Image (cartoon, helix red, strand yellow):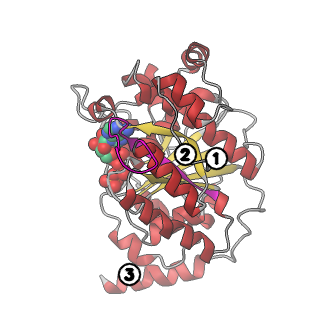
Amino acid sequence: MSRYLDALRQAEGERSAPRVDWEREPRPFRVITVTSNKGGVGKTTVAGNLAVYFRALREDLPVLVVGFDDQLTLDQMFAIGSGAPDLTVASAMRIGNLNAAIRLGQYGVHYVPSSEDLSDLKRMIEDPFRLQQVLLRTGWEGLVVIDTKSDLEILTQNAIAASDLALVVVADRPSLRQAERVYELMKGWGRPLERARVLLSMVDLRIKYERGQTQDVLGLLVSEIRRRGFPLFESFLSRSPLVASLYTNPEERVLSILHGAEGSIVRQQMQHLADDVLRALEEIAGALPVPGRARAPIAGSAADADESAEPPALEVDAQDNALGLEVDEDLEVWLDRSLGRTDLEHDGER
Ligand SMILES: Nc1ncnc2c1ncn2[C@@H]1O[C@H](COP(=O)(O)OP(=O)(O)OP(=O)(O)O)[C@@H](O)[C@H]1O
Ligand SMILES: [Mg+2]
């Protein structure tokens, strides 16, 4: 086994091309990585559902989801039909190109099948910039959304290093402390901090404080994040039992918030977030690289896809107006209107 790993490492060394200037290199794709060193904060929920919303909001933008976690949640959300895939993210990363593993999934989202065993791959990779090379070779035209495991090990580092924008998910004070490590990593690589933004997730607005300058967990976390100087999305996601129910239901697959949580506040928040993320990405990395025509499915055939694989673009457009979400609104105004809240009192930090 160790000889096999040594051989793979050697092959890896031989394959690694000179590093590219990730910020300036012209690429037909943009990369969003969802990360947090703390478990259970909502990373996979955010990554999978953002992909669905991106497809719904931007029909012309192909979206590829890649999971660097050894759970199969994303496959349970996107896979069409059953049966073990020939290639997974682990085998494709070893080959050095994701192309042959890419499948067309539900909602018109493409995905690379996850692997339950990433340990050999982790041992094989030493370079945090390996994924940049793999993605350049893959040449996906559109968006790549990467979900990471709750660690800062080599695969997560690769996902952050290859991102144009990292979403650093924070749900509480422990996860905020873990977020600091992502920013340290970014500083170590000399990457601009605005390429990593904190996203507040699973916020429970029922928790109120009687003491201190902030009234609730949202106000408290926002003021602590601002004090640290971390870039922050105005959009946030509430804790909702409806979201949890999407994972366990009679349909035996993970449902998307867009299709399974109608009427919920999280459905509106996710749309708001998807808009914010696309806007932030364009501010950071310029116009999104939309291909001339939609890319044909690679490993999975379009004929395998059922009706639900079509992005419900019209439905979302209609929703957009019905909800009246203005992406330029600031957090408090939006909160007041959506939740009927009173002033948040951010102790004059805005
Ligand atoms: N906004 C939310 N409201 C309520 N429950 C949520 C919300 N987001 C996620 N959950 C639930 O919390 C659990 C963890 O979510 P998720 O798997 O997305 O987190 P994660 O950060 O990817 O976890 P891990 O570290 O294990 O990869 C899931 O059961 C999910 O249903
Ligand atoms: Mg996860």
Label 2 with label 1: CB-CB less than 8 Å: yes
Of the residues tagged 3 and 2, which is closer to the observer?
2
Residue 136, quarter of picture: bottom right
The mark tally for this picture is 3
Kind of residue at disc 3: Leu
Give SS at disc 1. Answer: loop
Residue annotated with mark 1: 350
Give SS at disc 3. Answer: helix
Residue 329, quarter of picture: top right
Image position, residue 183 (x, y; %): 56, 67
Image position, residue 170 (x, y; %): 44, 53
Residue annotated with mark 3: 5
Q: Residue at the location (58% across, 36% down)?
A: 331
Residue 310 visible? The answer is no
Relative height, residue 255 to residue 298 (above, below): above
In the image, is residue 291 part of the stretch drawn in magenta?
no
- On screen, residue 328 versus residue 158, left or right, reads right
Q: Residue at the location (38% across, 58% down)?
A: 173
Residue annotated with mark 2: 346
Kind of residue at disc 1: Arg
Give SS at disc 2. Answer: loop
In the image, is residue 210 part of the stretch drawn in magenta?
yes
Q: CA distance from mark 3 to mark 2?
A: 53 Å
Q: CA distance from mark 2 to mark 1?
A: 7 Å
Sequence-wise, which precedes: disc 3 or disc 2? Answer: 3
> Which residue range is magenta in the image?
195-215
